[in-house]
Image (cartoon, rainbow, N blue to C red):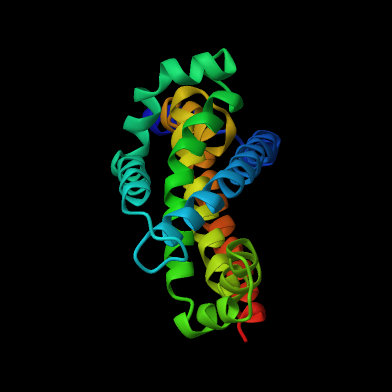
Amino acid sequence: MTTLLAIEDFNTPWANVPSLLLPAYGQTWVMVAVTMALVVLIGTPVGIVLHNTSGLGLFPDPRVFRVLNTIVNIGRSLPFLILMAAIIPVTRFIVGTTIGIPAAIVPMTVAGVPFFARLVQNALRDVRPDVTDMGQASGGSAVQVIRSVQLSEALPALAGALTVNTIAMIEYSAIAGSIGAGGIGNLAITYGYNRFDDNIMIATVITLIVTIQVVQFVGDRAVAALTR
């Protein structure tokens, strides 16, 4: 009985869980929002160039394609935890620290950009060639064809790619908690794991599950609305 009571003493009362969970949840979304903004801003043009320098693109260039393809493959090869540790000097140089939200955003962006670039490339590759040919035959420049034909036709697939990447960044933000980045992951490790707090662990797990389900649902609805 004494042992059971001692274990229960580690658990945060359920009434106090929201005061810990809500700030951490907000931190998670700050990390994800900033990271996704950078990922889309950088990853979209990289994916466009990847597709259009390949043999199926508007301006094939094997040398450029090989270089970009290799960089993207390297970026996607390393597990996030290893990548996060490997680029600590780069993170410190960019943001001046290796802990906290800014320190998490750097490796999350480095991991997210090649992933999203590949998804963009795949989305553009699925655009029907005759639609692209029609845009070129109409006298459109490469930029006009990319904007008005490729990206326009690939919108449903791009919405799906954005959904997949957002979910991946939520997962990465949880892993980033291991370096004291804050957010749900840090809460789960600091309280749930290190302090054997079952209530916090259960709350963080349920929160992540519900969040992923909501993001996937919204993404699926967006894809359905954009599909013609």
The quadrant of the rendering that contains the C terminus is bottom right
Q: In the image, is residue 99 above or below residue 77? A: above
Q: In the image, is residue 226 above or below residue 105? A: below
Quick one: 158 or 125, which is closer to the camera? 125
Observer able to see residue 197: no
The quadrant of the rendering that contains the N terminus is top left
Observer able to see residue 211: yes
Quick one: 199 or 139, which is closer to the camera? 139
Question: Residue visible at 52% across and 41% down?
Answer: 199
Q: Position of residue 147 (x, y in %)?
A: 64, 65
Q: In the image, is residue 47 above or below residue 88? A: below
Quick one: 14 or 132, which is closer to the camera? 132
Q: How many marks?
A: 0
Question: Residue visible at 54% across and 58% down?
Answer: 212
Taking the image as shown, residue 40 lies to the left or right of residue 121, namely right
Taking the image as shown, residue 106 lies to the left or right of residue 148, namely left
Q: Position of residue 181 (x, y in %)?
A: 54, 27
Q: Position of residue 227 (x, y in %)?
A: 61, 82
Quick one: 65 or 222, which is closer to the camera? 65
Taking the image as shown, residue 186 lies to the left or right of residue 41, namely left
Q: Position of residue 30 (x, y in %)?
A: 67, 38
Question: Residue visible at 57% across and 12% down?
Answer: 96
